[in-house]
Amino acid sequence: MRKIIVGSRRSQLAMTQTKWVIDQLKKAGAQNEFEIKEIVTKGDQIVDVQLSKVGGKGLFVKEIQQQMIAGDIDFAVHSMKDVPAELPEELFISCMPKRVDARDVLICENDYTLETLPEGAVIGTSSLRRGAQMLAARPDFEIQWIRGNIDTRLKKLETEKFNAILLAKAGLERMGWTDRVDFEALDADMMVPAVGQGVLAIESRKEDAEVTAILQLLHDDVTAKAATAERTFLKAIEGSCHVPVGGYATVDGDDVTLTGLIASVDGKEVLRVTKTSTDAVALGNDVADDLLGRGGREILASVNA
Ligand SMILES: NCc1[nH]cc(CCC(=O)O)c1CC(=O)O
């Protein structure tokens, strides 16, 4: 029986996700031996810089992809959110396990809530999307950049000037920390989640039929349909990580409903479009076209200028 080598970033979240996938594969009947190979990516080495300024999310996956193409690892578990729209020719997302809660959460100091946070409260986030939507709801807030893994950010809430921080609920859940911290889940209408948030994307080589078959054990079609709509949307607007962009799809029977969002960094302009279709790809493109036509193009141009 072939031993499967699984590449993983060294971060706590990445290792937890990778171990979870291996565990689930075994529970679903995979007989193989799995070995985790830790990979330290450029993205992991850079701290305290706003990520969009140093090359963006792709930093976390590029080196993993290179090792996969070279055959040094057989698959890797990514947060879908961190996977760029375009993959290398040799690779594909062969499995998306069932999505967890896609919403963002607000974690406040001193038992504050979104309602009771004082005027001018300092909110920590590393996401332009979260910052812009927060400012749209509460223009008096001050957004401050915060980086580091989830644990580091939670510590910074205690030790630094932040009154609250914003995180993905999925990260807290996967770490098993939903009991450790008090959080307020933000409605997806008020805070449109990031494309792919809450989804795990397992990447492998297209030609590796054996690994593809094993990973199918965990694949969830509903999740894949929603992720397809969201990622088609993201690709169609050619959104970079320099622009606040969100996309969130839900599936009900054959229907997919997608909300796309483009906002200015200061949250003064927020464009949102929601549409439903049975065709996830057509829907992603349709929502993108609509948003671009309604002023999204101008926002993107002004940020990229
Ligand atoms: N940007 C980092 C990142 N990448 C994936 C998650 C966890 C959420 C997910 O899997 O979608 C997080 C943490 C966060 O955004 O709070």
Image (cartoon, grey):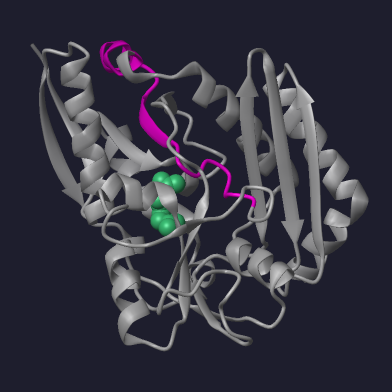
Give the quarter of the image for residue 134.
bottom right
Quadrant in the picture for residue 120:
bottom right
Q: Magenta stretch containing residue 229, yes or no?
A: no
The residue nearer to you, when weighing 132 against 206, is 132
What residue is rendered at 32% in x and 37% in y?
77
Q: Which residues are magenta?
A: 192-216
x and y percent of residue 234 in the render? Answer: 66, 43
- From the top left corner, tell me how far across and down residue 31 is, in percent: 11, 12
Q: Farthest right residue? A: 294
| Residue 69, quarter of picture | top left
Q: Is residue 90 above or below residue 304?
A: above
User: Residue at (72%, 41%) from the top-left corner?
Assistant: 259
| Residue displayed at 42% across by 74% down | 111
| Residue 116 appears left or right of 64 | right
Q: Position of residue 11 (x, y in %)?
A: 24, 56
Relative side of 171 to 279, left or right: left
Task: Looking at the picture, tell me which residue is in the foreground, 70 or 227.
Answer: 227
Residue 257 visible in this rendered orientation of the protein:
yes
User: Where does residue 217 sit, x and y in percent of width and height?
Assistant: 31, 14
Q: Is residue 69 above or below residue 94?
A: below
Q: Is residue 196 magenta?
A: yes
